[in-house]
Image (spheres, rainbow, N blue to C red):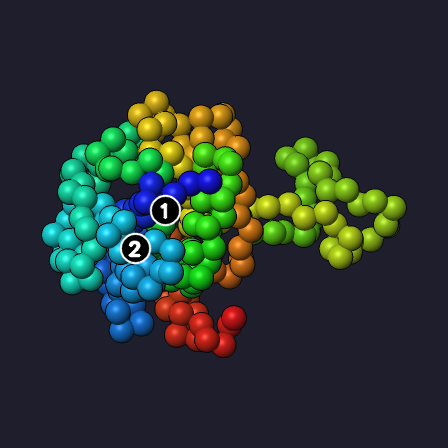
Amino acid sequence: MKNVNEICIVVQARLGSQRVPNKMIRPFADTTLVDILFEKLKSSKIIPTKNIIFSAYEQELKEIANSHGISIFERSEQSAMSEGDPLSEIYEWHDKLPFKYVVLISACNPLLKIETIDNFIVEFMNSEKEGAFAVFEKKTYYWNEDGKSITNWGDLPIMNTKFVEPIYEAAHCLYGSRLDIIKNGYWMDDNLPPNPKLFVMNELETFDIDYEWQFNLGELLYNKRDKLF
């Protein structure tokens, strides 16, 4: 079992999005995406605020973190401009933080609940695995590129998702990993592909803002979130 004092939460953000310029600091439901996530994290019942770290390069982002009392990792311009390869460049904090494990959380998922974040951390702490990854369940039918069904239809002549075995799709919003493996190019664990603890969550909470239409729709959903769950 992992100790909570060994785990930090890292939120990493930049202003260089090409598809949704300045999405982290643009007005969103009378606040911003970064403010929304910080408010959630400060209410965590599992991770103390001192374990929350914001990796940011631009001053506008740092000012938001300061207003919430969140610790800042001084991200380099090179990391902020990186497209993710190598991992040690984009996650340059991997060998500079006094923790053994990291939980990486994106600010692009405004519907993600703090209860879900806390449950993810608890399952990660209680798991014997060195990594964790959020997924959501899908029960539907799939075909490969050759047109061959990869779903077991059983003995049914028609599609009925009630009887389909579930598969799990990447949620892309919650990750757990050992920090020391990042220097060698690994993430979540040192297997290829990774074999982390899978954490099953509500698909709606995984709504991700990568495009302008998602920013606008996300704002509408966020304003109606009390009626969605």
Amino acid carrying label 2: it is Pro
Judging by the rendered image, the residue that carries numbered circle 2 is 48
* Residue 6 as seen in the image, left or right of residue 156: left
Q: Residue at x 38, y 56 (%)?
A: 46
Residue 131: x and y in percent read 45, 37
Compared with 117, 187 (above or below) is above
- Residue at image location 32% in from the left, 51% down from the top: 19
Residue 222 lies in what quarter of the image?
Answer: bottom left
User: Helix, strand, or loop for circle 2?
Assistant: loop
Q: Earlier in the sequence, mark 1 or mark 2?
A: 1
- Residue 189 in the image: state x and y as whole percent: 45, 30
What percent of the width, then of the height, locates residue 214? 40, 60
Q: Is residue 166 above or below residue 84?
A: below
Q: CA distance from mark 1 to mark 2?
A: 9 Å
Please give the residue where the numbered disc 1 appears in the rendered image.
Answer: 4
Q: Residues within 10 Å of mark 2 (few under 14, many from 20)?
A: some
State the count of labels. 2
**Residue 184 relative to residue 199: left or right:** left
In front: 55, or 31?
55
Residue placed furthest toward the top: 184
Residue 140 shows in the view: yes
Q: Residue at x 33, y 64 (%)?
A: 43
